[in-house]
Amino acid sequence: MVFSSQIFLFYFLPLVLAVYYLLPPRRRNLFLCLASYVFYGWWSPWFVGLMLFSTALDWVCGVQITAPGASERRRRMGVAASIVSNLGLLAFFKYFVFVQENLNVLLGVLGQNPTALLTIVLPVGISFYSFQSMSYSVDLYRGQAERARSFTDFACYVSMFPQLVAGPIVRYKEIASQLNERPQRGELFHLGVLHFMIGFAKKVILANSVGELADICFAAGSPGAQIAWLGAVAYSFQIYFDFSGYSDMAIGLGQMFGLQLPVNFRSPYRSESITEFWRRWHISLSSWLRDYLYIPLGGNRGSRAKTYRNLALTMLLGGLWHGAAWTFVIWGAIHGALLASERAFGKRSFWYRFPRPVRVLFTFVAVLLAWVFFRAEDLSGAAAYVAAMFGGSDGGTATSVLASRVYQPFYLLVMAVSALIVWRGIETGRLVERALESSTVVLCLYGSFLLAVLMMFSQAENPFLYFQF
């Protein structure tokens, strides 16, 4: 089940909201947890069992860590069990086949017979809820959070459907007090509706439309340079509006249930450096990687060489977190190298001699080139596409046919609107604030939402990109 679907919009959400507010406050966490299991189990019921196992394990580990009079050894065993179990599950379901495939390549080089590949279904959202659940145990061990009041509260935190399968990654300490008590206000519910409508319109009107254009360009065997660049820009817009739209809907749904979830995007394509980009893009993941990986590795406390190593390793693992493929590793390596170079030169870099608009443009181009590896099916496909962007392909005899498909008025209009929003638009939070002050803005938002609903009925495919991660 996805947010931008008929079953969710017209059946699941209204029913869950109605029952939720009919229940007494003390029963709402349990109901929200059960509703989230139904939402998650819509893909496959056995996914729920795996998440329940992970939840129960981290709950037990939390009890072990916070037990009165617990020795340091016992506390360490508790947090170690949580980390090993969560990473172990993630490694098996997400990376086991990847390791097998690369092992078979090595065996082939050595003249040995390959091993039989297992068929493993990747549970939706496992990367998100594993990180979220594991951070609870780590924060308990560090003394940065208190143990959940009950297993029901903790299970509700892990399974909460608004942000379960694609974030934002919420830490328990950020939401603990809201799980205990969250008096609902009509104004907060209205804010949630506005947030949800904006995210829904982003996803259906913009992300799905530019995604069609990106698919055409990337599927072309040998696009010319102009079309290759158009496809790369289209994918950059697609992944931004897809994921930020999901995050906006998640924040809105949280507010409908009285919960304030963290902002996950702040106009990242307006960044003037890669360092700034990662302060604006997928904020909950970048801060998670910083606090639970980069800083424990040593952060910037050692020599410059160790700082660069920690940056590079963090981004390599961040790339691998997104998917079990070398393309994601290369994507992470590109960002790690750029972050390290910016840290090395700092304000002394020639980069800061350019005016800000030029720095923003160059940063976007760097991010865009890295997105090609993120989008491509394999390394050879990514290399061929990058080569096409720089004139490595003349497009062949099919150029005119391809051009007639991509240079359609609808695609050009959506690309122009996307660019305008990306670089000149108002961030979602501020747009919601303006809507509270202006009936004209409210009418525009409701009109955009209605258009998105109508478009939803005509779109054949409507998946969220980040569900695969």
Image: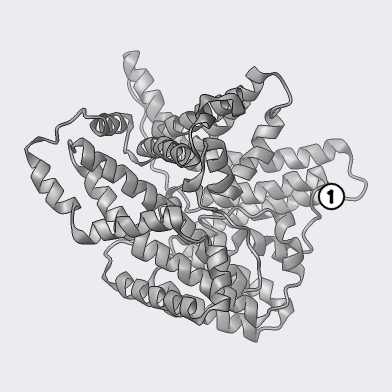
Tally of numbered discs: 1
Q: Residue furthest top?
A: 110
Image side of residue 467 versus residue 399, left or right: right
Q: Amino acid at mark 1?
A: Thr
Image side of residue 142 versus residue 136, left or right: right
Residue 154, given in percent of the width and then of the height, sits at 70, 60
- State the residue in front, 172 or 239: 239
User: Residue at horizontal 36%, vertical 74%?
Assistant: 453
Residue 39, given in percent of the width and then of the height, sits at 50, 67
User: Residue at horizontal 45%, vertical 51%?
Assistant: 466
Residue 143, given in percent of the width and then of the height, sits at 83, 46
Q: Residue furthest right?
A: 69
**Rendering colour mode:** one colour
Q: Is residue 172 visible?
A: yes
User: Residue at horizontal 50%, vertical 61%?
Assistant: 426
Image side of residue 7 versus residue 50, left or right: left
Is 292 drawn above or below residue 254 in the view shown? above
- State the residue in front, 295 or 46: 295
Determine which quarter of the picture holds residue 449. bottom left
Residue 134, given in percent of the width and then of the height, sits at 67, 46
Is 155 drawn above or below residue 378 in the view shown? below
Q: Badge 1 local density, few (<14 within 10 Å), some, or many (20+)?
A: some
Q: Is residue 35 visible?
A: no
Image side of residue 11 versus residue 27, left or right: left
For label 1, the residue is 66
- Figure quadrant of the N terminus: bottom left
